[in-house]
């Protein structure tokens, strides 16, 4: 479903500020894979997601989604293949528009706009049913402005919007990092439920090692722009944080350097 082949990216090349963010990165995800991604500061995690989303074009290599080479495809055209939830709950939604209006925008992603009535009665009922599964009472507030929602409510809505059309690949970019622990746990639970029920191919970046181990069927660790650990199946189920740190040290020859991850 997703193939990253020999992708490299250097920012500010030829200058004193040159930074190689991705170094001959290779990664393949099969349909339905739920892969958690962890790594130290500057490992290339978010840069990889931006490469997949088309925020910028790689210096070398190619990216394929469900057999389609999207390497040279602009971000707006690539959006029909992807769903994405950012770390900041303020991103991914239109604050001045209602909940149902935001869902309508998500439903029409990648489609031509027409002069037909914006939200049909059948769509409104579908939105209500989708919102019910969040158990946040948002189905009774569908005309409320999204900017009035809490961070957790907004992130849950963004997750629903990102998966409304069942994307080929779902990108979760530390989507619980800005939430308090209780709300983060709720959003992670919803993520698991939506991914499982729709069999979505997913990449989830997290700074929390426990979450990286507990969620998904596969865990990869990045270091200096490429994958150094790829753990799945029974090995992942039995993994502990201490073992993960030890494996990182062996694979990289260095100690893991991420205060956020270690503290979490």
Image: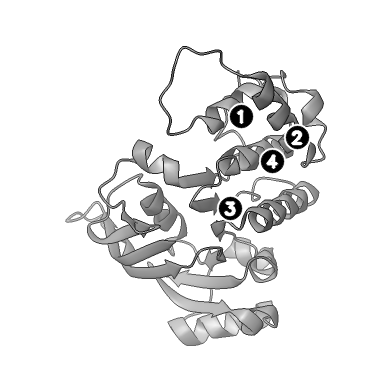
Q: How many marks?
A: 4
- Residue placed under numbered mark 3 in the picture: 174
| Nearer to us in this view, 153 or 115 | 115
Separation of residues labelled 2 and 4 (CA atoms): 14 Å
213 or 243, nearer to the observer = 213
Which of the two discs, 4 and 3, labels the residue nearer the N terminus? 4
Residue 112 screen position, x and y as percent: 40, 25
Q: Residue at x 60, y 40 (%)?
A: 164
Please tell me whether mark 1 sits on a helix, a strand or a loop: helix
Quarter holding the N terminus?
Answer: bottom left
Q: Secondary structure at mark 4?
A: helix
Color theme of the render: one colour
Q: Is residue 79 visible?
A: yes
15 lies left or right of 139: left
Q: Quadrant of residue 43?
A: bottom left
- At x 16% / y 56%, what residue is drawn? 14
The correct choice, above or below, for 261 with respect to 14 in the image is below
Image vertical order of residue 206 relative to residue 26, above or below: above
Give the distance between the C-alpha atoms of the residues marked 4 and 1, in whole angstroms: 12 Å
Residue 103 numbered tag: 1
Residue for badge 2: 129
The disc, 2 or 1, on the residue closer to the chain's N-terminal end is 1
Viewer-side label of 4, 3: 4
């Amino acid at each position: 479903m997703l193939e990253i082949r020999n992708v490299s990216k250097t920012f500010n090349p030829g200058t004193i500020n040159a930074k190689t963010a991705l170094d001959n990165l290779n990664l393949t995800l099969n349909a339905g894979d739920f892969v958690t991604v962890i790594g130290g500061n500057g490992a290339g995690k978010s840069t990889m997601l931006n490469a997949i989303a088309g925020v910028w074009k790689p210096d070398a290599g190619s990216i394929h989604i469900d057999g389609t080479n999207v390497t040279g495809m602009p971000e707006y055209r690539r959006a029909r293949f992807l769903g994405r939830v950012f770390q900041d709950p303020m991103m991914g939604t239109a604050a001045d528009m209602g909940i149902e209006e935001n869902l309508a925008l998500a439903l029409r992603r990648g489609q031509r706009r027409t002069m037909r009535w914006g939200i049909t009665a059948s769509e409104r009922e579908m939105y209500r049913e989708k919102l019910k599964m969040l158990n946040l009472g948002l189905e009774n507030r569908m005309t409320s402005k999204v900017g009035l929602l809490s961070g957790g409510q907004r992130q849950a809505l963004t997750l629903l919007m990102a998966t409304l059309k069942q994307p080929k690949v779902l990108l979760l970019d530390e989507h619980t990092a800005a939430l308090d622990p209780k709300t983060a746990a709720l959003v992670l639970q919803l993520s698991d439920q939506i991914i499982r029920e729709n069999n979505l191919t997913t990449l989830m970046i997290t700074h929390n090692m426990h979450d990286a181990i507990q969620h998904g069927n596969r865990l990869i660790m990045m270091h200096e722009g490429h994958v150094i650990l790829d753990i799945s199946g029974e090995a992942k189920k039995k993994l502990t944080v201490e073992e993960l740190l030890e494996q990182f040290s062996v694979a990289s020859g260095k100690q893991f350097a991420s205060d956020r991850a270690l503290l979490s």
